[in-house]
Amino acid sequence: MSRFLLKRLGLALITLVLVSIGVFAVAEVLPGDVGRTILGPYAPQSSVVSLDHQLGVDQPFPVRYWNWISGFVRGDWGTSYLLNTSVRPMVVERLKNSLFLGAFALLLIVPLSIGLGVLAALRYGKAVDRLITITGLSVIALPEFVAGVILVVVFAVQLGWFPSASSVPSANPVDWFRQLLLPAIPLMLVLFGYVSRMARAGTVTVLESNYVRTAVLKGLPRPVVIWRHVLRNSLLPTITVVAAQIGYLVGGLIVIETLFTYPGIGLLMYDSARGHDLPMLEATVLVIAIIYMISNLTADVIIAMLNPRVRLAA
Amino acid sequence: MTVESPDPALKAVPATVLSTVVSAQSSRRARMRELGRALLRSKTFMIGMVILLFWIFDAIFWPLFVPHDPLGLDPINTLKGPSSVHWFGTDDFGRDMFSRVLAGASTVLTVAPAATALGLVGGISLGLVTGYYRGLVDDILMRVVDALLAFPLIIIALLVLTVLGPSELNVIIVIGIVFTPLIARTVRSAVLVEREREYVAAAKLLGEPGPSIMVKEILPNVVGPITVEATIRLGYAIFAAATLSFLGLGLQQPSPDWGLTIALGRPLLQVAPWIVLFPALALATLVIGLNFVADGLKQAIEE
């Protein structure tokens, strides 16, 4: 197990280094002189040159990359060009808000999706199964902003139940629902599609297995068969899907946060990309990549823990 | 009919070998007929197909039946609600939303298929070569796929399009390039199975060169997984293209593109919700229709 873990960790680190080089390279070829962008078109060339020098953007690429990445590791993430504040507290603050929203969506939808997925499997081929399957199929590919906009028109504009732009909720639990429910639903729809599908498929496979038939034939009551025998095995793949979806959530948040102007890391990344705020952009993308990597790694480790064949093959 | 190791003592090999190749081809034809019947029976596939065909028809022929010019300004009738003249209302320039929704299908149905096609061409060639020859290229490709999978498509596109500048062509290129290694992976794993089959060994014994085996023998037998992958990818491409338009990284004003219209209509949500509602519903039906087709196809092929 530890050998497997080390190997996966090593691969993840290599990928992260590649990603960081990629991110830095792409961000640094953004058109336009950094000093010129900050100072505007009418600033004299001499001040542009001196600002470039002060920011260090006139140095060669490997030097700049090394300065950036070693600073990042030490916790010095640079200063935002646009906001003129330190990058790290800002990113951490926004990340916290995003994790709030993501966790809210995840906690609401995962139990529901698993429940409905299992229900569909138990009613295999019946009307309930079809309804759940078709719903999952319909919402899985719905772009988040499409579902989001329809929800806003109905529940914020027409009915006035929720605000059309969301902010970070106060400690009041009613406020939690008011602020987070509308932005969370589009994310929940996509998650519902994946999770319920996996739960259903896993349960259908296990229900057909011989040991479940034995359990039924030896006269165990149905709830016992389902709880003790079916779910334990059928939900294994679902757990890994949930872990892998945490990464999706972080990506999906860009769109949702833009739509609801929710102050999360996705909106921060979007704003810094549009405003050519390089230090902020690089930090947000790398942080998102790290989270993505951690959630994928977690999924892999869970699979390996549950299935000896995977870790032995490595 | 099995072809064992190419033993030089075996004189009768060519005849058996030939029949292996031929029988692989004829069973393929029978499978296609069966697949067609399964698709016609699948309700999910048929409903999805009707929706999809409607939008494809609309995307091509909208100029023939839009009631108003989708770009025509009407400064007197701005922000009017749905009425008998303007079924879906008008936007802040007085443009007819019904006409704009009908015309908007063409942009997303150009960008997404073009991007998917680009990804398919690259992915199939790369997948065939790496799956058949394995080796160094194969290892490199798998690392690239890992790195790409380590990232949501939207973030890659956001980064690249900020650099290249927003345009229809750039969106196609970005999505196509991101798709290439992903499609290549699917093709590769299908090829890995096929290359061990008898008919490939038979073709090798007949002296067919590698490229010809890949294209003429293996490719027709991996069409199934490629078709499924293509429909799924097309769904993602629509998802991505619409989302990028929404983020302002794709088409620009005055295009009637749905994602763009929704983004521009967002500030007017309180006064004129119909501007965003109808393009959103249109996009939803298109995506759902395509997903139904993909799922029906997947089930039919897997059976």
Image: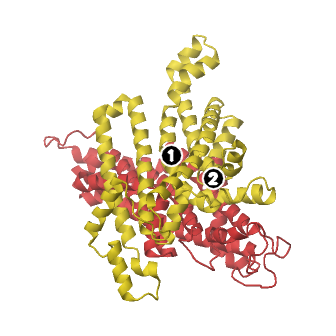
Distance Cα–Cα, label 1 vs label 2: 20 Å
> Horizontal and vertical percent for residue B149?
41, 53
Query: Residue A309 has which mark?
Result: none
Considering every residue shown, the one lying at the far left of the view is B9
Pick the front one: B49 or A29: A29
Pick the front one: A216 or A292: A292
For the residue marked with disc 2, what is the amino acid? Val
Say what secondary structure mark 1 lies in.
helix
Pick the front one: B147 or A270: A270
Q: Above or below — where is A52 with respect to A20?
A: below
> Horizontal and vertical percent for residue A22?
35, 62
Report which quarter residue B130 is drawn in: bottom left
- Answer yes or no: are tags 1 and 2 on the same subunit: yes
Say what secondary structure mark 2 lies in.
loop
Which residue sits at x=81%, y=81%? B77
For the residue marked with disc 1, what is the amino acid? Ile
Q: Nearer the viewer, mark 1 or mark 2?
A: 2
Could you say which chain is coloured yellow in the image? A
Residue B286 visible in the snapshot:
no
What is the crowding at mark 2: few (fewer than 14 residues within 10 Å), some, or many (at least 20)?
some
Which residue sits at x=23%, y=38%? B4
Label 2 sits on residue = A168
Residue A62 visible in the snapshot:
yes
Label 1 sits on residue = A246
Which residue sits at x=77%, y=78%? B67
> Horizontal and vertical percent for residue B155?
47, 61
Q: Chain of mark 1?
A: A
Considering every residue shown, the one lying at the far top of the view is A218
Considering every residue shown, the one lying at the far right of the view is B84
| Rendered-image quadrant of the N terminus of chain B | top left
